[in-house]
Image (cartoon, helix red, strand yellow):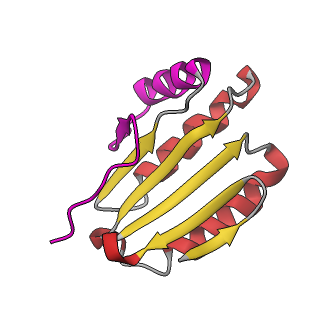
């Protein structure tokens, strides 16, 4: 069930797999961040986080300007602290964006996993 479908991002709840999926297109700019976070909060409040997996599909994310890297750090830290059973971040197809995300994850206490593609969860 797609909950949010905007130009820059989509948020979806996949009840059959107990997943919340967020797909980011391009770059979330500072002006978009507030609505993104509000939509995210509204979406994740619809599920039991300890039973669900959180998947951030960054496949289409573009490299961020260096001045935006601190916001990327904050966002990844935020994802880690949401209380989901597991957190997966799918690597961007852009090699530069991959390196940026990998560097960010090394600097913070990220409890999730950086993966090559959207994991197929095993619902018990």
Foreground of the two, 64 or 62: 62
Q: Residue at x 70, y 59 (%)?
A: 36
Instruction: Name the image quarter holding the C terminus.
Output: bottom left
Relative to residue 47, is residue 71 depicted above or below? above
* Quarter of the image where one finds residue 52: bottom left
The percent coordinates of residue 96 (x first, y second) are 60, 18
Q: Is residue 69 left or right of residue 113?
A: right
* Quarter of the image where one finds residue 58: top right
Is residue 54 located in the magenta-colored stretch of the structure?
A: no
Is residue 99 located in the magenta-colored stretch of the structure?
A: yes
Q: Is residue 55 left or right of residue 57?
A: left
The percent coordinates of residue 76 (x first, y second) are 51, 42
The percent coordinates of residue 91 (x first, y second) are 48, 33
The percent coordinates of residue 97 (x first, y second) are 60, 25
Q: How many marks?
A: 0
**From this viewpoint, which residue is outermost toward the bottom?**
46
Q: Residue at x 53, y 77 (%)?
A: 1
Relative to residue 19, is residue 58 depicted above or below? above
Magenta range: 95-124
Q: Is residue 48 left or right of residue 89?
A: left
Q: Residue at x 41, y 49 (%)?
A: 80
**From this viewpoint, which residue is outermost toward the right?**
31
């Amino acid at each position: 069930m797609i909950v949010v479908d905007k130009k820059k991002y989509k948020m979806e709840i996949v009840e059959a797999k107990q997943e919340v999926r967020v797909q980011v297109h391009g770059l979330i700019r500072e002006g978009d961040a507030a609505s993104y976070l509000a939509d995210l909060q509204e979406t994740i409040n619809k599920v039991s986080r300890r039973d669900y997996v959180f998947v951030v599909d960054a496949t289409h994310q573009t490299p961020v300007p260096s001045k935006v890297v601190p916001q990327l750090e904050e966002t990844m830290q935020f994802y880690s602290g949401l209380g989901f059973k597991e957190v997966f971040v799918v690597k961007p197809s852009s090699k530069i964006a991959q390196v940026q995300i990998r560097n960010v994850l090394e600097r913070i206490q990220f409890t999730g996993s950086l993966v090559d593609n959207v994991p197929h969860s095993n619902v018990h």
